[in-house]
Amino acid sequence: MKTSPSFAWILPAFLWLALGLGLPLLIILAFSLARREVYGGVQLGLNIQNYVRAFDSLYLAIYFRSLLLSAATTLLCLILAFPVAYFIALQKSSLIKNLLLFLVTLPFWTSFLIRTYAWIIILRAEGLINNRLIEWGLVGTPLNLLYNNFAILVGLVYGELPFMILPLYTVLDRMNKSLLEASADLGCSPLKTFFRVLIPLSRSGIWAGTILVFIPSLGAFVTPDLLGGAKSMMVGNLIQSQFAIVRDQPFGSAVAFLLSAVILILLAISYRTTKRGAEVRVL
Amino acid sequence: MTAIKKPSHPNLLAATLAVFAFLYFPLLVLILYSFNESRLMVHWQGFTTLWYRILLHDERLLDSLANSLWVAFWTSMISLVVGVPAGVGLARGIQRAKGLLEVLVLLPLIVPEIVLAVAFAGFYGLLSARLSFWTIIVTHVTFCLSYVILIVRSRMEQMDKGLIEAAMDLRASEAVVFFRVILPHLTPAIISSALIVFTISLDDYVITSFVAGVGNTTLPLQIYSMVKEGLTPEINAVCTALLIMTTLMILLSQFVQRSSLRLRQSLLGLTIILAIMTTPLWWHRLTLAREQRQTLNLFIWSGYVAPDTLKVFEQRFNANVQFDLYDSNEALMAKLQSGNAGYDVIVPTDYMIQILIKRSLLSPIDKNRIPNFDKNLDPRFLNKPFDPSNRFSVPYIWGTTGIGYRKDLVQEPVESWRVLWDERYRNKIVMLDDMRENFSASLKLAGFSLNSRAVAEVQQAKDLLERQKPLIRAYNSSNFQEILASGDAWLVQGYNGQIVRAGQENPNIGYRIPREGATLSIDAFCIPANAPHRAFAHEFINYMLEPETAAAVVNHTCYTVANRAAVPYIKKALLNNPALFPGEDILAKCEIIEDLGQAVLLYDQYWTEIKSR
Amino acid sequence: MTVTLEINALNKRFGRQVILEDINLSVRSGEFLTFLGPSGSGKTTLLRLLGGFERPDGGRIVLEGRDISLLPPHKRQVNTVFQNYALFPHLTVFQNIAFGLQNIGLAKAAIDRKVDQALDMVQLGDYGNRFPEQLSGGQQQRVALARALVMEPKVLLLDEPFGALDQKLRHQMQTELKALQRKVGLTFIFVTHDQEEALSLSDRIVVLNQGHLEQVGHPEEIYERPSTRFVAEFMGMENIFALVSVVDEGASLCCRTQGGQTIRIPKQSSRNGMAGFYAVRPSKIALSKTPPPDTVANVLKGRICEGTYVGSAHHWSVAVGRNETWKASQPLYSNRASQVGFCVQDEVYLSWDGQSGILLS
């Protein structure tokens, strides 16, 4: 199509994003190089002190924990999502397929805050689970299900699961089912087929889902805040506290940028290995 | 006879069902308990629609819902108008600035929400922009545009390019090509992106919390503060209502997408027309209150007003009070710094007042306009070091930070801070999510002043806190009394008012000020330097100092006021409660937190270390 | 004969690759002109340049005296029937046809009238309210045609419109199209890679090869007297042999093939210009077991190496000389008994007269 439309089509969007998004991001880049005034103001300058400080062992522990939690979330999502995605992909009727997909994404449409809050009710000491367990005599004292890493994990997995199911489904649906039959024909048990055929073939879906789950988990802060009891800081909490509580905007900006940089690098690697921005396709 | 069909892949089916159960369990719980008679959501006590009725009368909640819908609607509209042409243009191969635009479009999807939030906040702060609906909408559009652009572009790429050439061949100008050929093809993309943008905007908490001004509370913000205050089935009711509404919306959009083109187009047109036509109604509702009456913008601690306090004020002065809640002084400070939020009256705590004065963020109070100042206030709380002649602050509520505990679960008497370090109560201890308060407890335990600037002393306090950390269940400054009530904690560090109030419902809850002493805090009314309604603010403060008003606050919230004229109106039971009115000897051991200037950086650092272990 | 469209020295490149080079052509008013060539020959690009969907890199396109080279499609008085029809799926057949008329601002009554006429003209009078997806391929084709014709363009461009149809339908549509063109009297420019189609439909054929004009002429000219080897091969000519020498012998030319055979061709049959190849159709060559009389201009001796029976004829491949294979086609008549039969390995004589052959560049 050679007769291109004029630039005016994308001009409003371009301006809006450049000024409304690009500019603020540049500003916190500037902040990250600034100094904190005594009572929390910002003194602009050219100072990498914040970045140096961001690599202090104290904070590295936070980054590490965040990475660990995000990785755990991603892994759990993978394990839970695979059977579901596979099951849906195997359905013959497209009506059922669509219905199941709809049901998978429906929770996503409800408020994230609402869903997190529901878990508080379920997990707390006098919450649903503990109550039933005590009633049925399975435990003597209530289990510690809330305000710890377990609760954070549950919350994160719950929120991100649809984002793992969908890309997996997309790739499994497109897959040539006769490959599985060929594998069985050549003597592979179902389990072997799973590992030797199914997983390699769905690699791009696994990767897309991983990106879609890992990155938001890394920056999460509402979930650790509400479900984790504000006890363990993740990167998101660190950034938020710098801005909302400690009032060290320069340092917070530096950490924010580091987080974004890590994510960009991850995405760059992903782009190279899959040759197409798979996460965009899912939309 | 037909053969019975066995489900294929029974294992997969089982796994899928299990996962679906996991996905829907919380939602079902929510819905179920919204109809539960009991407030506690523990046992089923009967079916009722009580909470829905309360919901319908909860003006604040309904206002926030209206706000959210308003914001979501405009966000969707603007995003579509700006984003659809951009998506079309990108797909049709515009070359200029294409690369840069594509990067910009991907940024909101890559950069974490918290980073976007602080960027926007910093941006508006730098511009000293007045935070309002428009800052929210502009911000929402900024991060929602990407969805529209990407979805529309994807759909455009699927379009048969020949159709555009054919249209041009048939003498269609660019405008005709867009409206008569491209747009009809894009209808499903427009509907789904509008739906996504609407939902994202409706649901956004993180970014909105950083860029909303006074009176712009959206539903997620309201729910968040309700969750922090305490869980009631009313929240369940809201959630259920939202759930139903969202489901209906999606079903509707699915239906529309699958129906014929003609039906689709007419429905779309109908929706837009309806939405635009009803705009005057919403706008009317939202601005009615503000325009007709005097406005007062209040930023106050959650739990510091009685239900009628503000209503009576509104009626008497023909006013409209917009109020927002916060649960930490630092949050207050951050809000004041991040942009012109437009508050008239704030209620900071002593040391924060000191800081605000030093940063020239407060405007002096004209005592001539507050006759109740000299008449009613207790002199014991005046002329404190943080504001020597009360030039900037009018004391309102004072309290102590001590130990709340479950009498039925903690066997021995609670006398000292040491009990919060007791190994026997591992994982049953909650401390405030507040740096100074944590250090106050440990400094007092170590026998030092809670305003110590001596590095050695602070270091010792820090070591104590680090040793305590493994025993701690959670850090919580907003609803610690609830955690105590629910049994998730047996011992909490908390403010006396909230704990005493919880004790009224649950007699097993007690409060003690440890023998080493505790924090005494005075929260006072202040007027920010850039308050829009300064004169009216004075009226409000004067009203709050009235004996009946102050007493009503005490009677409801169980926090004590620095108002001696109110004493005759306070319930006897509260007056006799040593938790609220401790003896002089105990008071003598309590200290007010002071601002430590540069020294606070050390505390900051230690606190982060503690939090991150 | 008026000239409607004038193409002068037209050039088109994509990056470094040359798509069209130095195209010069005059299109006559009311003629059915076909661009014929294999894929990659540039014929579609040439059509798109005429339609305004591409811009030329050099040269001019002049329509009835007006230079339209750089005009966008919606400002040209030409219309295109697209290869995949490009019917608007969200509009009915009626609305599709009305689309262009609405853009030029006709009154509703006039539009209605013209659309009805157009529908009648393509025999789809009752289908106005249907949607394109409800029509068969052939019907969609006709709607596309009607939509373009109703605009009364000066030239109608058709981009391989019958490519997606099956054989039988294609023949039928070809006939209808030709009749329509005669009736309406518009200038049609038609693009195809199918030489049979081109031969049956066109008043003139333009043969393109790799962006160059190979030959322009009436169907018989193209078929009987191709001017280049490419055109000959494209039109199915066989027995094309490279020549090493051409000697003028007065009334005829004596050509010597690479394989060493001597062939004669009368001078008036040949054209002026380079002669690099000799060609003669297999159907013009006679086979015999005995040597033909001396009056025959060209005689070759060889051995049959292959034979293919195709019902109406026997195609023979005959090895001649060291390394040449000549093809001869023996038509089979109903009274077969009187014909001579051949088999592989037979020694035969090939004979044909001088003017049957042609020289190619």
Image: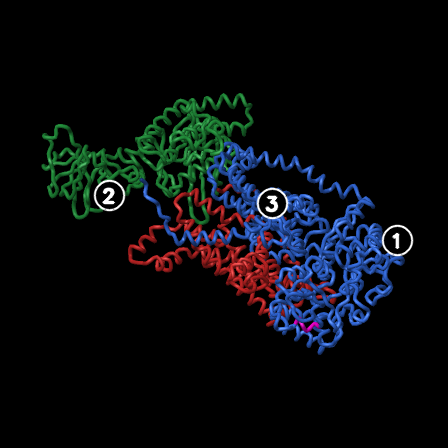
Chain colours: A red, B blue, C green
Give the quarter of the image for residue B398: bottom right
Left of C156 or right of it: where is B296?
Answer: right
The amino acid on which the numbered mark 2 sits, given as a three-letter code, is Phe
The amino acid on which the numbered mark 1 sits, given as a three-letter code, is Arg
Q: Are marks 2 and 3 in contact (CB under 8 Å)?
A: no
Left of A103 or right of it: where is B239?
Answer: right
Residue tagged by mark 1? B369
Left of A71 or right of it: where is B583?
Answer: right
Residue tagged by mark 3? B241
Residue tagged by mark 2? C241
CA distance separating discs 2 and 1: 116 Å
Q: Nearer the viewer, residue C325 or A37?
A: A37
Magenta-drawn stretch contains C117? no
The amino acid on which the numbered mark 3 sits, given as a three-letter code, is Ala
Q: Nearer the viewer, residue C344 or B475?
A: B475
Q: Categorize mark 1 by other alpha carbons within 10 Å: few (<14), some (14-19), many (20+).
A: some
User: Split into 4 quadrants, where in the image is the C terminus of chain B?
Assistant: bottom right
Residue B599 image point, x, y percent: 74, 72
Compared with B139, A143 (above or below) is below
Q: Categorize mark 2 by other alpha carbons within 10 Å: few (<14), some (14-19), many (20+).
A: many
Viewer-side label of 2, 1: 1
Q: Which residues are magenta?
A: B416-420
Q: Is residue C323 visible?
A: yes
Viewer-side label of 2, 3: 3
